[in-house]
Each structure stands twice: as structure tokens, then as C-alpha cells.
Image: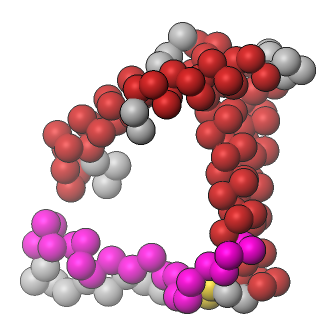
Amino acid sequence: MHKKCCQDFQKTVDKYLIRHRSILDILSKHQEATARVNRAFAKAVTECGCVKVNACRQQIPDSANYSDLYQYMSSHISGEICPSCKEILAKELGHCLFYFTAICNLTGVGLEDVMKEEQQRVNALGFFHLS
């Protein structure tokens, strides 16, 4: 994301976040939005059926190196999300982003700074990031 895009989005969120300005409201709205993302994906599986989840234990050969794990790890998703489910999922992700950005605004954290710092951490830690 470009700096101007992040800054513009932060300004827009700040401008239109009126009713839920309390950090407690924003934290709970963010959690609710995250739950709605989960629900949107679950509906894509259980109601629409455009994607399937076939979860099982990851199959990793004993001889695999840590740097090779990516090629053995499965997302457990098969199929492709249909345009209708994708639209709903994107809308719910947008709500998550809105409230995440609101948290950034109230705490004085730049959205772009968060993204840059996380990218640097991921790049520096490589395979060991969040493992």
C-alpha cells in the first residue's frame, strides 16, 4: 500500500467514525468484524459450497528441511470462492480494516508504519516469523 493511500484511509476512517469513538467500542467492533469474516467464509463452505475445507494433519516428510516446509503445507481449501461469496468476504474484510485503522488512529499509530515494520520483521525473521 502506498503511503498516501494509507494516510487517506486513516483520515477517512477518522472522519466517519463518529458513534464508536471509545477504544472499548472500537476493540469490540473489530472483534465482531473478525467474527463476521469467519462467518462469511464458513457460509461459502456450508451454504454456497463454492469452496471446501478438507483438513487433516499436515504431511511433512521426516527428511524435509525447515526451508522446504512451504511446499508441503496445505491451506486445506479446495475450489475457488465464487464472485458472490468473494464480494461478501471482501466487504467483511473491509470492516475489519476499518476498525483496525480506527485502533491505529486512536493510538497514534500509522497504518503504513505498521505494515512497513511488520514486513521488515517478516523479512528479517523469514521462516521463523510466527512459527
Residue at image coords 78%, 35%: 29
Residue 38 appearing in the image: no
The number of callouts visible is 0
Q: Position of residue 78 (x, y in %)?
A: 52, 88
Question: In front: 62, or 50?
Answer: 50
Q: Residue furthest right?
A: 19
Residue at image coords 47%, 19%: 110
Q: Is residue 82 magenta?
A: yes
Question: In front: 3, or 61?
Answer: 3
Q: Is residue 34 magenta?
A: no
Q: Position of residue 16 (x, y in %)?
A: 79, 22
Q: Is residue 120 left or right of residue 14?
A: left
Residue at image coords 13%, 66%: 67
Quadrant of the frame with the C terminus: bottom left
Q: Is residue 108 left or right of residue 74?
A: right
Q: Is residue 10 above or below residue 84?
A: above
Residue at image coords 19%, 50%: 126
Report which quarter residue 38 is drawn in. bottom right
> Magenta region: which residues?
65-85
Report which quarter residue 12 is drawn in. top right
Residue 100 appearing in the image: yes
Q: Is residue 131 left or right of residue 65?
A: right
Quadrant of the frame with the N terminus: top left
Q: Position of residue 2 (x, y in %)?
A: 40, 33
Q: Position of residue 63 (x, y in %)?
A: 10, 83
Q: Is residue 57 above or below residue 66?
A: below
Q: What colouring style does the render use?
A: secondary structure
Question: In front: 49, or 68?
Answer: 49
Report which quarter residue 20 is drawn in. top right
